[in-house]
Image (cartoon, helix red, strand yellow):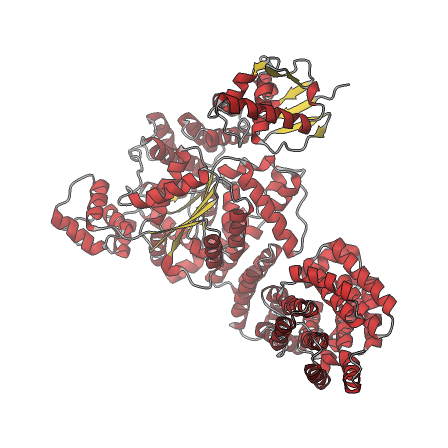
């Protein structure tokens, strides 16, 4: 029986035969051809016409040749193609008798249904519409058909919204209306419907926000205000029947930026042609960066681009990836999520946890090692960004506040697909950008890839200031008035606009300096609106009406009316859409700053306490994403104990995203608060907990030998002693590894034994393995091989494969790989070469199985060292070849360089090879890195001198090995043999 072909062309092309998915055709033109034939199935299309449809700009001969090649390719890629395609010398068609299910046909059949079953049929049709026809393909023939189907989908959404509203299913009505507006934001009757539905649900704040969005959209896109009917609904919502509806809210005119607009347009043309770009618009505060980008954003939307925008805030208030989260929740990207596989949705749920509720079959994300998690997360975000195929504009305001993790992700997006139609436009204040900020690395990488354009925005000239002022006022100004305004504002657009909004005239006593004019603007507000502005300013970032209402000490009428007044007077404006019903933010940071200055210190503390409580109440199911904000507000309210608790919770949330530097900052702030409290056992116990939590993130951003780690460990030990408690296992292991890095092996063994006791007490196999690891390493580097061997064997015996991820996340290595590799060297020194080879092979096999790069690097390092000691040049070369590729971590870089130098010596480059090893010897002389590194370097240098037949240099290094002692004792017997052999003139043994 011929298998049924199931084809989806709504959204991304997907084809399966008999339930088996056909691999992607990897050709947009092949998908376009199949879509054309399917939409015209049963009809034989002349080849000449088909060639013209697919290649309208080619000559007829070339187009027909292209079609012939494409059909040949399609026959090879599509199983049993002749069962579905009817190809003759003159025509091509989809066979009428070929069993086929096409989503477009099913979609239209459902919409054509009548009778009692129509409501359910329309719902099913809307569910089938997962995207516009053949997204990512821009062949001319698609345009009319794509728009026809799109309009049918929008009509179906409108029908569903109306039906749901009529029968009182208001949540569904809102969902359908919001989806409709994402497709057609100019449909005023739907904005009005959304207002009615929110009002009927008892959510007047969201109803008013729907009006605000309607006003701004119509003004921005059409230059008109809402109709009288919409205004009537608005008046009922804000309950100001005598107050006229607000005038159309035109933003300040864009003046004097023609050159910069041309630069942005050029970047857009490059992107539209298939070149990923990053544009940085920089300048001082108030110079008009965001206004320029806002105009450009609207320009791109009119040209069919999907647009998502986000804003960065100071690091103290946001978790890692905050701008990325905002993008993913935007209307532009949100609609792309259903097209992803469940594996990628799982990764995205780390950033957008509500996906687990919205898509119930998506499994929750499990903790992963840092490298694996970052790789999967970046891939998932890239899949969303690149899923649409069409041009995408990502906007990020205030890039100077961006976190390191977002910078890394942006760098990945810029390079993963260089021909993607992706444009990232960022704004930044030059005066706030520090040399050590993460943004520098991002910009340097973009410059190196030649995909960065920089636009420096300056102040306006006198004539441009005059144009801006006259357009804002709607009246002419005299030359003297213009000069007066220009002298006072120095051409800063924000100062000019705010002065005019505050009522500045040449004869007024109002100074156009920014704080003065904003003071005057805030003074014009009603008292409730001014109080609400202070509360919003205390939030410190964009805010939802839900949080504002929950934190306000006022009734609903006061909150709704005050928020509306702030919007009407352009103190705040609506920003991103989202699960919380959308957000607002101040029109400019300067307004936020001045509004906050108006709040007394005592009232600030009360406001921050209420905001913290409001954030907790509105995020009960998952407070992780707002944990930093809650901590900061509790801190500013003076509530030390709960602030410390939330800083710790926020640090744990940061560590789940492997944002170690942020976790350190959060825990450090918690410690600062605790250290200001009077001493007590409770305070000391809390400090010990925080310092124990700080150990893991300190390692992720530094080393066990860092001064910060040492100070933290010393204080934690002191606290444990004062409190009369045994140090926690994470502290014991941290102390043991730090002792190893200092070559204080006796101390490391002591901490290892204490860790083992804790592990046995708790029945914790992970800690048993880690205790055996540190004890074995300490014994190994003391040349106590009889003690080291059973510890390594115990670690391997008690290791459980299910614990691999736990070991890697907590301790950054796989101990089975490390202990097997070190066991191999131990067995060699004990005179068991065959067992040594077996252990080395097992270490490398397990390293391959678990795929942990750092652990494999360790196995390669000590495998190469074993090959050197055994005189096995073939094995050594194999290990060094791989080590030179993967050994770039700080603790192994010098080792990889030295081994590569040794291979160079073997190949005859004795001078450069030995110079590389000498440099590595000097780099490791002071210690502080992995234990034994300096001894390994000396061992390699000795081997290199022997290979170069430099007897004098070899004797010198043999003496240095013997004199060094410590970890070099492992090779003391070898050094003595070399000395003896060279003294006899027989060469090395």
Quarter of the picture containing the C terminus is bottom right
The quadrant in which residue 252 appears is top left
- When the figure is inspected, residue 610 is found, relative to residue 170, above or below; the finding is below
Quarter of the picture containing the N terminus is top right
Please tell me which residue is depicted at 24% across the width and 56% down the height of the picture: 513
- Residue 962 horizontal side relative to residue 542, left or right: right
- Residue 751 horizontal side relative to residue 569, left or right: right
- When the figure is inspected, residue 737 is found, relative to residue 196, above or below; the finding is below
Across and down, in percent, residue 694 comes to 61, 66
Q: Is residue 791 visible?
A: yes
Is 928 in front, or is 917? 917
Q: Is residue 523 visible?
A: no
Across and down, in percent, residue 589 comes to 37, 53
Is 957 in front, or is 731? 957
Across and down, in percent, residue 899 comes to 68, 68
- When the figure is inspected, residue 659 is found, relative to residue 157, above or below; the finding is below
Across and down, in percent, residue 695 comes to 63, 67
The quadrant in which residue 363 appears is top right
């Amino acid at each position: 029986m011929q298998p049924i072909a199931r084809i989806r062309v709504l959204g991304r092309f997907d084809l399966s035969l008999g339930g088996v998915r056909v691999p992607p055709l990897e050709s947009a033109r092949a998908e376009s051809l199949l879509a054309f034939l399917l939409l015209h199935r049963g009809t034989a299309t002349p080849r000449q016409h088909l060639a013209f449809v697919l290649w309208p700009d080619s000559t007829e001969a070339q187009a027909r040749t292209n079609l012939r090649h494409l059909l040949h390719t399609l026959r090879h890629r599509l199983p049993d193609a002749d069962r579905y395609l009817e190809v003759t010398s003159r025509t091509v068609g989809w066979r009428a008798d070929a069993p086929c299910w096409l989503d477009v046909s099913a979609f239209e059949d459902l919409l054509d249904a009548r009778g009692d079953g129509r409501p359910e049929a329309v719902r099913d049709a809307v569910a089938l519409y997962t995207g516009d026809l053949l997204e990512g393909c821009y062949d001319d023939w698609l345009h009319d058909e794509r728009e026809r189907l799109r309009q049918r989908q929008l009509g179906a959404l409108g029908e569903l919204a109306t039906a749901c509203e009529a029968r009182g299913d208001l949540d569904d009505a809102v969902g359908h209306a919001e989806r409709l507006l994402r497709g057609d934001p100019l449909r005023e009757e739907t904005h009005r419907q959304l207002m009615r539905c929110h009002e009927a649900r008892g959510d007047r704040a969201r109803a008013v926000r729907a009006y605000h969005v309607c006003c701004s959209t119509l003004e921005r896109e059409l230059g008109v205000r809402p109709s009288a009917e919409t205004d009537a609904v608005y008046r009922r919502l804000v309950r100001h029947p005598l107050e006229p509806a607000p005038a159309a809210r035109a933003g300040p005119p864009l003046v004097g930026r023609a050159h910069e607009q041309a630069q942005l347009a050029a970047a857009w043309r490059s992107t539209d042609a298939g070149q990923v770009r990053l544009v940085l618009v920089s300048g001082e505060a108030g110079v008009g960066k965001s206004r320029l980008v806002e105009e450009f954003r609207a320009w791109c939307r009119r040209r069919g681009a999907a647009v998502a925008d986000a804003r960065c805030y100071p690091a103290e208030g946001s978790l890692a990836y905050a701008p990325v989260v905002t993008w993913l929740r935007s209307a532009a990207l949100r609609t792309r999520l259903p097209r992803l596989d469940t594996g990628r949705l799982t990764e995205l749920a780390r950033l957008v946890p509500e996906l687990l509720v919205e898509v119930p079959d998506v499994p929750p994300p499990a903790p992963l090692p840092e490298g694996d998690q970052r790789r999967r997360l970046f891939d998932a975000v890239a899949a969303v960004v690149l899923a649409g195929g069409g041009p995408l504009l990502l906007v990020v305001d205030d890039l100077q506040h961006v976190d390191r993790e977002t910078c890394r992700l942006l760098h990945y997006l810029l390079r993963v697909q260089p021909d993607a139609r992706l444009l990232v436009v960022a704004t930044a204040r030059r005066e706030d950008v520090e040399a050590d900020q993460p943004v520098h690395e991002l910009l340097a990488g973009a410059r190196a890839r030649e995909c960065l354009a920089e636009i420096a925005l300056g102040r306006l000239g006198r004539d441009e200031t005059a144009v801006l002022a006259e357009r804002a006022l709607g009246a002419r100004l005299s030359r003297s008035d213009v000069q007066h305004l220009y002298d006072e504002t120095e051409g800063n657009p924000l100062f000019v606009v705010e002065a005019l909004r505050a009522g500045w005239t040449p004869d007024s006593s109002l100074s156009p300096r920014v704080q003065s004019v904003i003071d005057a603007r805030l003074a014009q507000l009603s008292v409730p609106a001014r109080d609400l502005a202070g509360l919003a300013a205390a939030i410190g970032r964009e805010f939802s009406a839900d949080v504002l209402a929950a934190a306000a000490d006022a009734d609903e009428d006061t909150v709704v009316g005050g928020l509306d007044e702030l919007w009407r007077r352009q103190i705040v404006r609506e920003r991103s859409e989202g699960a919380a019903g959308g957000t607002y933010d101040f029109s400019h940071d300067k307004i936020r700053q001045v509004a906050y200055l108006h709040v007394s210190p005592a009232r600030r503390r009360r406001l921050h306490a209420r905001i913290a409580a409001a954030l907790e109440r509105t995020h009960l199911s998952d407070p992780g994403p707002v944990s930093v904000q809650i901590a900061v507000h509790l801190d500013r309210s003076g509530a030390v104990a709960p602030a410390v608790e939330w800083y710790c919770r926020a640090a744990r949330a940061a560590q789940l995203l492997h944002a170690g530097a942020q976790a350190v900052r959060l825990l450090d702030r918690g410690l600062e608060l605790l250290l200001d409290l009077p001493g007590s056992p409770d305070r000391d116990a809390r400090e010990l907990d925080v310092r124990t939590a700080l150990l893991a993130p300190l390692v992720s951003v530094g080393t066990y030998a860092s001064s910060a780690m040492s100070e933290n460990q010393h204080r934690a030990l002191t606290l444990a002693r004062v409190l009369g408690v045994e140090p926690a296992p994470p502290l014991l292991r941290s102390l043991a590894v730090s002792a190893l890095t200092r070559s204080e092996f006796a101390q490391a063994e002591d901490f290892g034994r204490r860790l083992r006791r804790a592990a046995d007490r708790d029945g914790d196999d992970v800690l048993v393995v880690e205790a055996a690891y540190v004890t074995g390493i300490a014994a190994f580097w003391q040349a106590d091989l009889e003690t080291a061997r059973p510890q390594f064997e115990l670690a391997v015996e008690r290791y459980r494969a299910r614990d691999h991820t736990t070991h890697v996340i907590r301790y950054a290595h796989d101990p089975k790989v490390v202990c097997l590799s070190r066991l191999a060297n131990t067995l060699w020194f004990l005179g068991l070469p065959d067992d040594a080879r077996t252990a080395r092979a097992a270490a490398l096999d397990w390293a391959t199985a678990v795929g942990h790069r750092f652990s494999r690097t360790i196995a390669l390092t000590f495998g190469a060292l074993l090959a050197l000691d055994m005189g096995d040049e073939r094995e050594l070369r194999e290990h060094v070849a791989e080590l030179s590729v993967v050994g770039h971590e700080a603790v192994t870089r010098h080792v990889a360089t030295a081994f590569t130098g040794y291979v160079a010596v073997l190949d005859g480059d004795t001078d450069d090879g030995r110079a590389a090893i000498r440099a590595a010897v000097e780099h490791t002389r002071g210690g502080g890195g992995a234990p034994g590194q300096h001894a390994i370097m000396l061992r390699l240098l000795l081997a290199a001198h022997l290979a170069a037949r430099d007897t004098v240099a070899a004797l010198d290094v043999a003496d240095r090995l013997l004199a060094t002692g410590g970890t070099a004792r492992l090779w003391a017997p070898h050094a003595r043999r070399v000395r003896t052999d060279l003294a006899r003139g027989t060469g090395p043994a």
